[in-house]
Image (cartoon, rainbow, N blue to C red):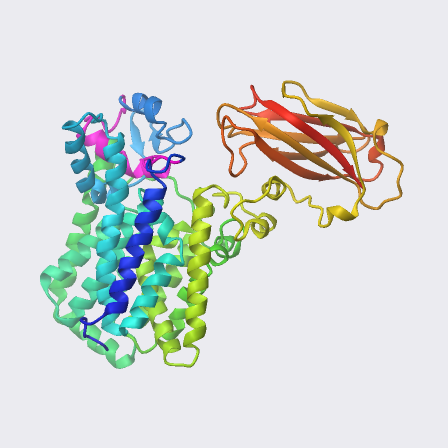
Amino acid sequence: MKTKLSSSPFSIGAIAFIIVITLGFRLYNSDLNPNKTLNVLTWDALGYYLYLPATFIYEDITELKWYPAIEAEYGASGGGNLYQANLQESGNYVFKYLGGVAIMESPFFFTAHIFAKNTSFPADGFSKPYQYGIAFGAIFYAILALILLRKILLRFFDDRTTALTLLLLTLASNWVQYIAVDGALSHSYIFPLYVLIIYLTMVWHDQPKLYLAMVIGFVIGLATICRPTELIMVFIPLFWNTHTREETKQKWSLVTRHKGHVIAAMVFGLIGILPQLLYWFHSTGDLIYNVGSKWSFLSPFFRVLFGWEKGWFIYTPVTVFFVAGLFFSRSYPFKKSVSIFCLLNIWIIISWFHWRYGASYSTRALVQSYPVFALGLGALISRVFRKKWQPYLLVIALTLIFINLFQTWQYDEDILHSDHMNRQYYGKIFLNPRPSALEMSLLDTRDWVKKEDRLTRETIYQSASEFSWQSPVKIHLIDHLPNTDSREHWLKFRLELKTDGIPAGGFIKTSVDNGLTQPLMSRIRLNRPLYKPGNWNDYSFYVKLPPDTDKSILNVHLEGSGTDKVDCRNFYIEYLF
């Protein structure tokens, strides 16, 4: 194993480059960009954070009488409904998310609170100092974690391997999104705990010390009350240095000689989870509270890995190398600990009942454990660097980094959708910075004309002037469609719409009804990618017509929330055949 940590320009440069890219994405998605705002304490992130303002500002962690004013001012829940806390029969709220992340966030919360109290910003827990404090706190932890992870990797690999491992681990994956942009979620704050547990495990096996065992136990406990599934972190020290039969014997001999260390680790593990137990007891009267998670371990959702919705291997293909690296770790002391942890971790993640994990670029629930995957990835890269395939690997690495950073930008611009991706739409937006209205329609429909120019077109409805769309547009197709023997029959819709706000739940709905069979329905979301409130937004989509359409009635109308005041212009419907 390589132990020399000096003279490592490539890995130092890699970390510097990662920091620049990370800060660039953070600043781009902040108030410094006139089209953006920095508002990270919302949706799931709010659930992890609520402990801090509730405890230290409002001194109300059960009734939450203070929260409605915060919701009215900041819209922190994300949807108007405080799903982040469960209302009990007693009238008390119990936070749905565990408090470990809040403990990790606390230094930045207190710093922001002191700053807010001494400036003109509201010291309410949600004004700009708190938003920036938590967002940049995640980056601060990530930088420290990368420095320590570099030290770990240099223990086993050379400088070039370490550099490329760090670059691929971060810039070719969804790490950037969940450190730089969505950093208030749990993933960014748990990420350094995985680096720390690997380092402490490595050092303890070099020279067992009681304080190291204590810290190992505490870190595992703290990670567990960040997300309970992180308890499997225990497999890292448990199976470290068991890669051969002889090493396994020496490992358990070492553990036997230091039984007190094991007991100390267990005690400090309990200390790590104690704050959560005390909170539950205070809020419910019980030490354990069921937050309501459901699992399907016997029939996991492999779409988490392979699905077009947000599949890990689909949108961040570098992760294929993460897993492949497990097969190249045979000669390293981390072989069993990394393999067992990674495979079990993946199985747990793909078994959660809510397999989409809400808004997500790729599979965000695995991001925090990337330091463990880094060891296998380093083993793979080290092997390739010893072969003649090195130039090919560098080309692949650059390609994966470019594609991922571009897709991260697309995700932040809402081009790459956070929850409703599909194969057809992804194919049209891949490396496409400005998808057309027709291409964006594929988020909601599979109807697509491959070669429109080979079809004849005839306009059957047009309204170029501006009007307020209040009532449905009805067209008797028998009065408009020409006689034709064509095998293909399509309608193409083109229009411009404008609303003052974001019509989050609104749709353009079409139906073709011949009075005999079930009407043919189609709907396109108003809040499409690149939607700009207060501006004219283009919409265009196809509807494939069934046989005998000429005897039907076409109905086009708006439905859903946010459609009470919609202006329309340049509305055209064309018949393609």
Picture coordinates of residue 332 (x, y %)? 29, 75
Q: Is residue 403 magenta?
A: no
Q: Examine the rendered structure and indicate whether residue 552 appears above or below residue 8.
A: above
**Rendered position, 119 above or below 277:** above
Along the line of sight, the residue nearer the viewer: 209 or 393 = 393
In which quadrant is the C terminus drawn? Answer: top right
Q: Is residue 469 visible?
A: no
Image location of residue 371, percent across then percent down: 30, 60
Figure quadrant of residue 181: top left
Q: Main secondary structure of the magenta part?
A: loop
**Residue at the spot x=21%, y=46% of the render?**
273
Magenta span includes 45: yes
At 67% from the left edge and 34% from the top edge, which residue is drawn? Answer: 494
| Looking at the image, residue 40 lies above or below residue 432 | above
Question: Of 283 and 319, which appears nearest the observer?
Answer: 319
Q: Residue at x 77, y 39 (%)?
A: 545
Residue at coordinates 54% horizontally, 52% vertically from top-left? 430
Tell me residue 211's x, y (percent). 10, 60
Magenta stretch, residue numbers: 36-65
Please state the horizontal and vertical placement of residue 395, each as a whole percent of the image.
44, 68
Left or right, 497 with reference to 129: right
Residue 575, compared with residue 168, is above or below; it is above
**In front of the other: 427 or 515:** 427
Looking at the image, can residue 208 be seen?
Answer: yes
Q: Quadrant of the N terminus?
A: bottom left
Q: How many marks?
A: 0
